[in-house]
Amino acid sequence: MRTIKHPGAKLDPRVISLPCRAEKMRLILRSGVSVLAAVEEALRDRGYESAVVHIKDGAFLPLVYVMPALSDDDTHAAWYSDTHSPAGRAEIEELVLTFGRRDGEPFLHCHGIWRHADGFRGAGHLMPHDAQFAEPVEADVWAISGAILDQLEDSETNFKLFTPVELRSANPNSGQRAVLCRVRPNEEINAAIERTAAEHGIERASLHGIGSLVGCDFVEGQHMASIASELFIRNGALQNVEGKPASKLDIAIVDIDGNIFEGEIARGANSVCVTFELLIVEG
């Protein structure tokens, strides 16, 4: 299985996970402010500080994003491209974002696919302080209580990464039983999901989140060779098959050249590059 070498020593545990609750809701995210502000306001109005958000409609004006890139020094194993700021309105095809905090302030991490005004189909990592929605958009949201994603320094990767930490909640009994996770580098993603769910006593679940993989192999035979990538889960599920947990992840992933790959990934073949931010929701 493919792996990647990071600048720091390997840290344990390889999956950081916390039990929480997740409530499903549909929210309107307003235009005229940054994407970060729009998400923060909508969640704050419902009393939540962390969430995973899925959007399949709407547009950006402006759109500002970066793509994955190779690192040009030894301080990081992977990096980001120059910033892309295409002119005009960009239609949203699909995106997923994780919302939490950084340095005590609201923050989010977003990967998606969009179409520039000239028709180019792009994908990557949204710049949440700079991008704005062109008009209000509807979002499917899993609002999290009992835990929050907090962007903390990580000596293994030399990045600040969203990490689950406990958070006292005003909604302690709302929603469904869930687990908020960060999977560390070089962990096979399906195995990590299945092991973590079992540790928390979950046999069946929906899976939500974003991350990166060291290359990617798909069930239908596609192969992405790039060691740096950005991905989001389009549809993910954990089932019990003959008494054993089995996870399926249908993803969209972009490589360093802007090529977009889509579909169900091959179970047991794909390792995490930098991080994988994951919400496991029982049911």
Image (cartoon, rainbow, N blue to C red):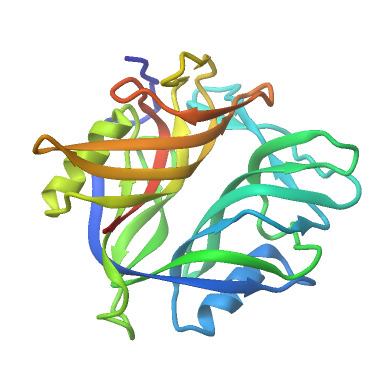
Which x, y percent locates residue 25?
47, 72
The quadrant where residue 36 appears: bottom right
Residue 260 position (above or below residue 145): above
Q: Residue furthest left?
A: 243
Is 76 left or right of 14, judged from the image as shown?
right
Residue at 31% across, 80% down: 169
Residue 139 position (above or below residue 174): above
Residue at 35% across, 26% down: 271
Is 181 left or right of 125, judged from the image as shown?
left
Is 227 left or right of 146, judged from the image as shown?
right
Residue 203 position (above or below residue 67): below
The quadrant where residue 115 appears: top right
Residue at 40% across, 27% down: 7
Which x, y percent locates residue 68?
61, 31
- Tell me the quadrant of the picture where the C terminus can be found: bottom left
Q: Is residue 140 visible?
A: yes
Residue at 69% across, 26% down: 258
Q: Is residue 14 visible?
A: no
- Tell me the quadrant of the picture where the N terminus can be found: top left
